[in-house]
Image: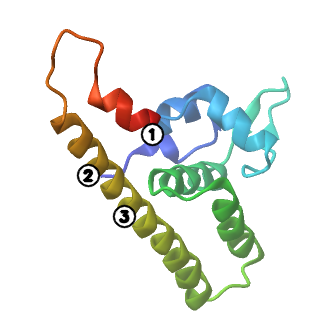
Amino acid sequence: MTDQSNQKPLKRGALANLTGCNLETIRYYEKIKLMLPPDRTTSGHRIYSISDQSRLRFILRCRELGFSIEEIRSLLSLVDTGNYSCNEINTLTRLHLTSISKKINDLKKMQQTLQTISQECSNGDTPDCPIIDALSA
């Protein structure tokens, strides 16, 4: 059985609850034009269509996977025009994967450095600390 709550237009608060996204984040995505301007009710409330809901979930999933705002903008511009190939999307994804791999390597180097300098610490009560010395070098 599918969840019927996302099968109808929603106000911003309901959309935030449904997606687990902060209201301010949705406003921000609208402000920077990742989210398209939603329709409005006669009383002026923003109302998010099923398409809007899907777009927000796409953005949120991209963010979970570490895509930058500009990378998401590039993906969405391809999707919005409908003029893209799987190869183009794969190329953008692989570029992002290369960036993540570099960050992982950098984090491993940082981890090793911090492990090395923390092992030199005697945990003494004096202000003579090899960690501070290493960070100051």
Give SS at disc 2.
helix
User: Quick one: label 2 or label 1, which is nearer the N terminus?
Assistant: 2
Q: Are marks 2 and 1 in contact (CB under 8 Å)?
A: no
How far is the residue under mark 2 from the one under mark 1? 17 Å
Disc 2 marks which residue?
A: 112
Question: Foreground residue, 123 or 44?
Answer: 123
The amino acid marked with disc number 3 is Asn
Q: Along the polypeptide, which appears first: circle 2 or circle 3?
A: 3
Q: Quadrant of the C terminus?
A: top left
Q: In terms of image quadrants, where is residue 27?
A: top right
Q: Earlier in the sequence, mark 1 or mark 3?
A: 3
Q: Residue at x 71, y 43 (%)?
A: 29
Residue shown at the point (63%, 34%) measured from the top left: 25
Q: Residue at x 55, y 59 (%)?
A: 67
Residue hosting label 3: 105
Tag 1's secondary structure? loop
Q: Is residue 54 at all visible to an observer of this figure?
A: yes
Task: Give the quadrant of residue 13.
Answer: top right
Q: Residue 137: which numbered mark, if any?
A: 1
Residue type, label 2: Gln
Image coordinates of residue 5 in percent, x first then y, are 47, 39
Left or right of 120 in this view: 104: right
Query: Which class describes the residues within 10 Å of circle 2: few (<14), some (14-19), or many (20+)?
Result: few
> Badge 3: how crowded within 10 Å, few (<14), some, or many (20+)?
few
Pointer 1 with pointer 3, Cβ within 8 A: no
In-front residue for pair 103/118: 118
Judged from this view, the residue extending furthest toward the top is 125
Residues at marks 1 and 3, CA–CA distance in whole angstroms: 23 Å
Question: Residue 122, labelled with which disc?
Answer: none
Q: Residue 2: image x %, image y %?
A: 36, 51
